[in-house]
Amino acid sequence: MKSLILKTVSTTLLPLLILFSVFVLLRGHYLPGGGFIGGLIAAIAFILHAFANGLDQTRKLIRIHPGFLIPVGLAIAILSALAPVIFTGDPAMTGLWYEKDIAILGKIGSALFFDTGVYLVVIGVCLTIIFTISESV
């Protein structure tokens, strides 16, 4: 696309949307939000950048193939889901929490790691689909 306005807006919005997606991810284990919605917001930010600046510029910005995020995210989600079975003998997907508060994050637990895995999977799947469709057109 050759719109100067869209290029300027997409360049300005990309870091803001990524920051907002991380906020939604970190807020998700306490309130509505989490990995899925945060991942969609991040994917939309990169898709907007690709529409405005071209697919090649967005690929240079991301630096890795988005399909690589899928198995990494799945591994993080599966490990966080199985952590209670491995460490405490509790059923899978039981929440494990660190007792002390961590600055900015608050209480950290296995739910945050599961959401992070989902976040990476959603970004990887959405970008892989959109980039593949864009390449074939």
Image: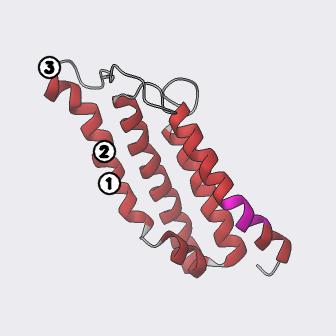
Confirm or deny contact between disc 3 and disc 1 (CB under 8 A).
no
Image quarter of residue 69:
bottom left
Residue interval drawn in magenta: 9-14
Disc 3 packing (10 Å; few <14; some 14–19; many ≥20): few
- Return the disc, 3 or 1, that comes first in the chain's sequence: 1
Magenta stretch: helix, strand or loop mostly: helix
Cα distance between the residues tagged 3 and 1: 25 Å
Q: Left or right of 83: which side holds 120?
A: right
- Seen from the viewer's position, the closer of residues 98 and 75 is 98
- In the rendered image, the vertical position of residue 70 relative to residue 56, given as above or below: above
Q: Left or right of 120: which side holds 98?
A: left
Under mark 3, the amino acid is Gly
Mark 1 lies on residue: 72
For the point 52% across and 62% down, which residue is it?
A: 127
Q: Which residue lies furthest to the front in this view?
A: 103
Q: Left or right of 84: which side holds 25?
A: right
Under mark 1, the amino acid is Val
Task: From the top left corner, tell me how far across and down residue 35 is, in percent.
Answer: 49, 40
Mark 3 lies on residue: 89
